[in-house]
Image (cartoon, grey):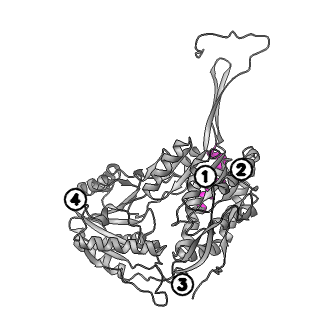
Amino acid sequence: MRRTHAVSTTNTIQHWINGAATPGASTRTAPVWNPATGAEQAAVLMAETSDVDTAVVAAATAFETWGESSLTQRTRVMFRLRELLVEHEDELAEIIAAEHGKVIDDARGEIVRGREIVEYACGIISHLKGGYSDQISTGIDSFDFRQPLGVVAGITPFNFPIMVPLWMHPIAIACGNTFVLKPSERDPSASNFVAELYKRAGLPDGVFNVVHGDKAAVDAVLDHPGIEAVSFVGSTPIAKYVHERATASGKRVQALGGAKNHAVVLPDADLEYAANHLTAAAFGSAGQRCMAISAAVAVGEAADALLPVLAEKAKAIKVGPGQDVGNDMGPVITAQARDRVTSYVASGVEQGAVAVVDGRDLKVEGHEDGFFVGPTLLDRVTKEMDVYTDEVFGPLLVVVRAADLDEAIELINANPYGNGTAIFTGDGESARRFQRGVHVGMIGVNVPIPVPMSHYSFGGWKDSLFGDNHIHGPEGVHFYTRAKVVTSRWPHVSRSVEAAFNFPTHG
C-alpha cells in the first residue's frame, strides 16, 4: 500500500503574509526535492529583504490589536488550532513525508509532539499569572504582570518542519506577540499549511506570517529593527552566528545548536531492551534528529555482548520511501547529505573504526536515484576520530568503549556539545550519579531520546545552546514576554502624604 501526496512539478511555493499566499518581490527560487526519488517536485520562492520587511510591517500592524486582545480570545484560537491539527494530521504527515522523506508514522509523531505545545498554549492564562503583594508598606501595594514583546521571529530547520515551529509560534502568539517564520527551504509546504489552519482557527491576518528563503532572508530577519526577538534551531555554527548577529541588533535570542548525544550502556542493563531503543534512537528519521543517539558508550563487558545485538537489529531495518507503509526508515534530505554521511563512514574506517554494519552501498529497488543511506554501525571508535567529534546527522551509530561509569561521564563532559544523553542500567545509584554528573541539558534514564513534555522546556548546555532561555514550556513564556512591576498608593484626600527627598524605604 502506498500513500501519496500529489505535488505538481510546476508548483511554486509562495510566502504567506498578512493572511494570504503571495509571491512578494521574490525573483529567485530553490528546488524542493523528493528525497525518495531524487527528483525535483516543486520550487520555493527565495525572499528578498523587502519581503521580510513586508511581513514585519504586516505583523507590526497586527500587533497593535492582537497585543491588546484578551487572553480568552487568544486561547480560543489555540483550542481551535489544536482541533484542526488533529483533523488534518494525516494530510500533514503526508506533506512531511513527501518533502522530508521520513516515514509516515514518524511524521505523525512529530505532529503530535508539536500539538502538545499548542495544548500548553491553550492554558496561557495560567502561565501568565503574576503576583500580588498587599500592604508591602503603609498604604502601598505591589504587583507584577508580563506583556508581549511585539513582532518576534523563528528560524527553523528541515528535520522537524512541523514540530520545531510549533515549539515557537503558539506560545509567542498566545502571549500576545505576532510572528514571522522563516522555515527551511528544503521542506517548506508544512508551514504554509499551518498558516492556513491558523486562518481557519480565527487568527487575525498578519499575526502569523511565513517567509521562505536562504541566508538573505535569515540576515534580513536578524537585522530588522522591527523584530524584537529571534528563536532558532539548527547547527552550532549557525546558532552561534544567529546569536551574535541578532544580539548585536539588540534582540533577544534563543539559538539551539547541534549535538553529539551519547547513550551509556552499563553491564547490568537489559541488553535486548537497550539495543532496541538505541537502534530506534540512532536510525529513526534516518538519524536526522538533534536528539538522535549518535554515540553508544559501552561500559566494560557490555561492549562485546551489545555489538551483535545492535548489528542484528540494524540489519533488520526496512529502508525505503517514507510514504510506503511498512518502512522503518526513509532517505536523508538531499544528495549532499547522503554524500556527507558516507564520507564520514569512510573517514572512520580509514582512521581505524570497524564497520560492523555498512550502509554506504544501499540501493532501494525502483528508487535508485533516491538519497538513501543504510543504517551503519561502527565499533572501536575513539574520541579523536572525525566520525566521533563531528555532528554527522545521518543513520550512523558509533560505539565507543569505556572501562567504567566514571570514564563514560568524563567522555561525555569532554565533548563540546551538551544537548541530550541517556543511560541504560538497572542500578538506581549509578543512574543518580550519572544524571548529577553529566554536563548535559536533557537526560534519559532507560529513555534514549529524553525530549521534555510541554510543561518543561527543551534545551541543551555548552555548544548546544546560545542564549539564556530554553525553548517552549515555562522558559518559552519567559522568552516571549517581559515583566512590569507596579507599586501603587491610593491616599485619602483628607490625609496628605509627605514626599521625601531621601531614597524611599518601607514603613
Q: Are marks 3 and 4 in contact (CB under 8 Å)?
A: no
Q: Magenta segment, principal secondary structure? A: helix
Q: Which residues are magenta?
A: 115-128
Residue, disc 2: 57
Q: Quadrant of the C terminus?
A: top right
Where 21 sits versus 470, above or below?
below
Q: Nearer the viewer, mark 1 or mark 3?
A: 1
What residue do we see at 51% from left, 49% from top?
254
Residue at which label 3 appears: 324
Q: Position of residue 170 (x, y in %)?
A: 64, 55
Question: Which one is in front, 445 or 458?
Answer: 458
> Does residue 302 sit above or below 325 in this rendering?
above
Q: Residue at label 1?
A: 153
The earlier-in-sequence mark between 1 and 3 is 1
Q: CA distance from mark 4 to mark 1?
A: 45 Å
Q: Position of residue 6 (x, y in %)?
A: 65, 81
Badge number at residue 404: 4
Q: Nearer the viewer, residue 288 or 312?
A: 288
For the residues marked 2 and 4, what is the alpha-carbon distance in whole angstroms? 58 Å
At horizontal 44% and vertical 71% (from top left) the residue drawn is 337
Query: In terms of sequence position, does the residue under pointer 3 or pointer 2 come before the other?
Result: 2
Q: Amino acid at mark 3?
A: Asp
